[in-house]
Image (cartoon, rainbow, N blue to C red):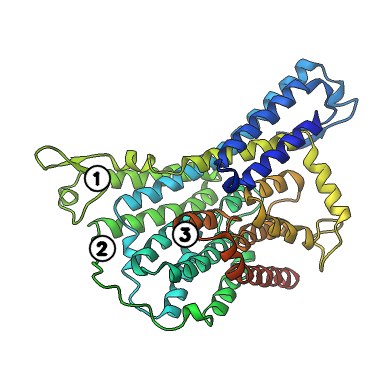
Amino acid sequence: MESAIIAVFVFGYLAITLEHNLKIDKLIPALAMMAICWAFIAFGIEDFQNWFDSGAHALVGGENGFGALATDDKMHLMEEGLLHHLGKTAEILVFLLGAMTIVEIIDYFNGFATIKSFIKTRSKKRVLWIFAFLAFILSAIIDNLTATIVLISILQKIISDRNIRVWYAGLIIIAANAGGAWSPIGDVTTTMLWIGDKVSTGKLFGYLFIPSLLCMIVPTFIASFLKPFQGNLPQEEGAEEEKTHRFGPTMLYLGLSAIVFVPVFKVVTHLPPYVGMMLSLSVVAIFAEIYSNSKFTMAAVGANEGYDENADGLPVHHSPVHHSLSKIELPSILFFLGILMAVAALESLGLLFGFADWLKTATPQLGTEMHDGGVSDLVVMALGVGSAVIDNVPLVAASLGMFTEPLDHELWHFIAFAAGTGGSMLIIGSAAGVVAMGMEKIDFFWYLKKISWLAFIGFVVGSAVFMIMRTLF
């Protein structure tokens, strides 16, 4: 039965990886994989000899352990394990739902148009650096996926020539993934490690800020000498200045501050991060409702998606919170649910720990070992390269079950960096890349030829800097 479960996981993985070829949304195989894996566990529960008790964080194994229990006791342990994993997964999903809703509320008031107003230059090289740093900083605050969507949307309003835009989009992907690696809320994978008590906010910043910064700066510096970034952008004829909402800047600063507040809330209260995110969402929602009911809002300049006109031509008000909740990326939430719970099935059977032991012994050591008898740097870098081919969420989810190092061990910070930045090497390797691919219709092989080598250089430089810093400090 274990072989069947592994086979289901492998085929589900392949379906996720070949999403664009099969024309099937990746959430479908992820959800099917989760349900089938757990169903097989339930059907074959009598035959299993090992079980990992996540609550006690111990392996109940052997013929005198899990294998000796009655079927009812095994089913009880399985149900407890399923509930435990669902609870830990729900922490991540509720956190992401809160963050996505805050971002959509900002967008409801057209708050991101404030960022566009900062860009005055027409120099291609200067615009490149502006967008690279914006992607690096914004992705650390509102996550790399959302930052990519926002910046490419702004890019489309500044540059009409798609052949020029795709180059900027490629560098935005690299910068956004680099920025997401050093923030606990910048990428789903770092959020998973943070909520799983593998990394803390302060140490994550301390270990990864400089490697992540160089991972962004080096490719951007090299790209600035390439032909597509020479000269000035053409003046857009007939371009009209975008009308902004009266409360747009206010909601932008309020929303970003609310998201940044979440790590502070966790440090002060020691409560899970999703609790702080719900508090932040409630504060932002209160102001959104107040501003949307204000007479100033009714007279706001420009059209807003939250308003329609009735037969008399008067504005009909809709709740900005309800509107924002209808706009969040629910397929991504369901995908994370499926993939995390499927990986949890492998963890519960102890399969991930066996694979981890094999990795530790079979992989040659590279440079300084991360801990005595532990995981080599080569294993972690392989995870980073693998995240370019396979989604980095299941890779990090698997690493959470494979390795047992304590909070803020160097291993977890290196995994956060490798999984976060390694996905930039292929356009399908990260959520930021996939969304940019869809928004700009970027060809897979064009990205592979023009951008992948830059992303690889950034990944190697950042990894080398991390190893040097770990050795020195």
Q: CA distance from mark 3 to mark 1?
A: 29 Å
Instruction: Indicate the position of residue 435 as horizontal and vertical percent values.
Output: 49, 54
Label 3 close to label 2 by CB (< 8 Å): no
Q: The residue under label 1 is which amino acid type?
A: Ile
Residue with the mark numbered 1? 290
Instruction: Indicate the position of residue 109 as horizontal and vertical percent values.
Output: 29, 52
Q: The residue under label 2 is which amino acid type?
A: Glu
Instruction: Indicate the position of residue 457 as horizontal and vertical percent values.
Output: 65, 72
* Left or right of 16, for residue 329: left
The numbered mark at residue 148 is: 3
The numbered mark at residue 204 is: none
Q: The residue under label 3 is which amino acid type?
A: Thr
* Left or right of 458, for residue 169: left
From where the camera sits, is residue 53 visible?
Answer: no
**Badge 1 density bin: few <14, some 14–19, many ≥20, Cα 10 Å:** few
Residue with the mark numbered 2? 242
**Which circle's residue, 1 or 2, is located before the other in the chain?**
2
Q: CA distance from mark 1 to mark 2?
A: 24 Å
Label 1 close to label 2 by CB (< 8 Å): no
Q: Which residue in the rendered view is the most extreme toward the right? A: 63
**Which circle's residue, 3 or 2, is located before the other in the chain?**
3
Residue 18 or 128: which is nearer the viewer? 18
Mark 3 lies on a secondary structure that is helix
Instruction: Indicate the position of residue 263 as horizontal and vertical percent values.
Output: 51, 53
Residue 151 or 415: which is nearer the viewer? 151
**Badge 3 density bin: few <14, some 14–19, many ≥20, Cα 10 Å:** many
Q: Residue at x 82, y 63 (%)?
A: 369
